[in-house]
Image (spheres, rainbow, N blue to C red):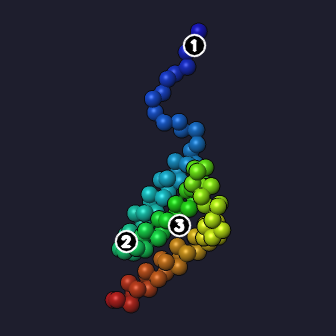
Amino acid sequence: MEQPQRSDGPDMGNHLTYWSIIGITLLLCFAWLLTGSLVLTSLIILLGLLHLAQFFPPAEAIVRADPILPAIRRFSLLLVIIITAIALMIRYIRL
């Protein structure tokens, strides 16, 4: 009889969750390089984590319990674009 192979690694069944975590990490690096500001970088990361919460049921329950967080999640791409534009504008004005 064949025995199933034993793997000590994590369950790779949900690839979308892992790609989302990689995307959030890349967003962190991009935000820090773009803004150079801890506050703006933290704001962009919090918006990214709202999207990541949908893959974790306890976090999703907290997001859905609040009436404002789903709306912020819906408009987070627009907010990131606005923050990026403001950061670039401030950088351009300083020069």
Residue occupying image coordinates x 62% and y 55%: 61
1 vs 3, front mark: 3
Is residue 17 found left or right of 35 in the rendered image? right
Q: Secondary structure at mark 2?
A: helix
Vertically, is 18 above or below 45?
above
In this rendered view, identify the residue nearer to me: 55 or 77: 55
- Reading the chain from its start, which is encountered first: label 2 or label 1? 1
The span from disc 3 to disc 2 (Cα, nearest Å) is: 14 Å
The image position of residue 23, as x and y in percent, is 50, 57
Q: In the image, which disc is placed on residue 38?
A: 2
Q: Is residue 25 above or below residue 77?
A: above
Q: Which residue is mark 1?
A: 2
Q: Label 1 sits on what residue type? A: Glu
Q: Earlier in the sequence, mark 3 or mark 2?
A: 2
- Residue that lies at the very extreme toward the top in this rendered image: 1
The picture places residue 62, in percent across and down from the top left corner, at 59, 58
Query: Which residue in the rendered view is the most extreme toward the left?
Result: 95
Are there few (<14), some (14-19), or many (20+) residues within 10 Å of tag 3?
Answer: many
Residue hosting label 3? 47
